[in-house]
Image (cartoon, helix red, strand yellow):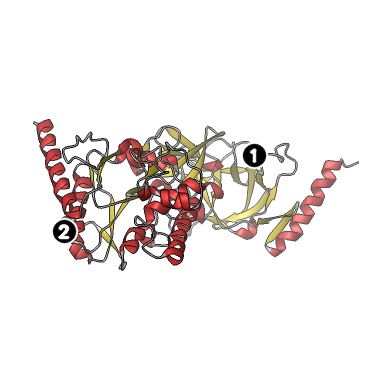
Amino acid sequence: MESHREVQNQRVFRTLHLATMSGLFHINGSQVAKGKNMYIMDYKGKILHSKNNGEFYSKNINDINKDEVVFIKDSEITEIINLDSDDIFIYDHEVLFNKIISIGIHNDVKITYDKNSCTYLFSKDNKYLCSDNELIDFNKIHAYTWERFILIDDYKVSKINYIMSNSWVSKRDGNIYTPKNIRLKDIFSLCIGPINIDVCKIRTEDLGEYKFVGIADNWSPEVFLLYSPHIYITAYSSINVLKQLALCVSSIRKFGKFNGKITVMTDQTIETIRDICSDESIDIDFMEPKDFVGFVCSKYSIMNKEIYKNSQPLLYIDPDIIFDRPIHPLFLDAVLSETICAPLETFNRLMTHPPIGSSLIQLDQLNVNIYSSGVNGGTISFPNIDDEKTCEFIRLVRRTIANIGWKFGRKYNGWADQEVLNFISYKFGGLNSSVFTKYASYVIGDTEDVYTQRGFVHFVGRSSTEKVIEMQNYTSRLIEKTNIINL
């Protein structure tokens, strides 16, 4: 007599066999997509190819020859949930039925799946397909490492290439790994610095544009965050503001040691901005705000703009800022936080200081601790423009600024975006003030204040002309100090 499990397995198989005719099958009420065209990857991370005469060869994943690459057609792949597994309650493991398929001109190839290693075996005439350093053919009678393959679709191919061509921060050790530190190696490993990710365990949902999850040592999850910093600055038609911009950009390059992307939100031409900053690599985001509110709020007009795509973190700064030490630690802290970051104004109180939101907080009758500080809106980092929490926060800030303008008049809040930034942050959260505060210095009074080279200096509380003079003086002092150190 057949066991209950055997009867159940047959019933499941028959149900799946009939359901796959429509391209989807249903298990316990859920839909599972039918298999895609799958490439074959060997243990060294290379993709299987076949010549017209049936000879096999392999190529690197970033150099696939579409005309000769071997793939298994989706009609030959049947995916099911392994209902027999004791792991069904905690892990939706996918298995492949043993099937007879063709590879290139090779017919009657048997493909079987090995659950323990998450790999596939291809055999013909009782010989296994083997990929060694000299020959790829059906020539082995035992299935060891060289005889094991994995199946990988176009999406995973493109994502692995994307990972290998960008820089990533490891959440484990906080280190940045550049493309020269990332490679495919045996056995089925994506090597990122000292961390070996199991390619066999990679799943589609693990591979994000700004973040991906890999499984190391066949069990331990590792998280990596895209490191592609991008600075953008607002600078419109004022002569003094454009002078501030030039000094700011110079400090980013010279003292901040940053050679990456800088974009200027401006109403000037790209030629003008590049000439002012003596920097041919700068881009512009052309905008034409009509008043102060438009000027200061334009910084939030970053969503859905191609120029800011694939950037993480995205750092906004006012033009009246001088960086006085390498900016890399600030970027790294911002990325690892995975939050919107801005520095505290530790010298002002949220309950009583209008520029950081006291009037709105009082108007909304919010209870604020008398010692609470607000944040400065002149330096804000966003994880990226596709981050859901970032987009939600920015949309709420912009809507609130607009609503205040319609209800009370466009000139009601004299500091516009910074007031609303603090109001929304205090009322709903969403802004991290612990990351950047240690890097920030402010010049608010005596022009002879001592600068501590914490990271950057924000020249606030003075006229635009005075800012230019003080920024020039501070830049000269930094150059002098640098020259002394280099002697």
What x and y, as percent, mark residue 170?
43, 37
Q: Quadrant of residue 190?
A: top left
Nearest to viewer (mark 1 / mark 2): 2
- For mark 1, does the 10 Å Cα neighbourhood hold few (<14), some (14 to 19), or many (20 or more) residues? few
**Does residue 372 sit above or below 108 in this rendering?**
above
Type of the residue with mark 2 = Ile
What x and y, as percent, mark residue 346?
35, 38
Residue at label 2?
276
Residue at label 1?
115
Question: The C terminus lies in which quarter of the figure?
Answer: top left
Helix, strand, or loop for circle 2?
A: helix
Type of the residue with mark 1 = Lys
**Does residue 239 sit above or below 120 in this rendering?**
below
**216 on left or right of 163:** right
Q: Nearer the viewer, residue 270 or 36?
A: 270
> From mark 1 to mark 2, how far is it between C-alphas?
62 Å
Question: The N terminus lies in which quarter of the figure?
Answer: top right
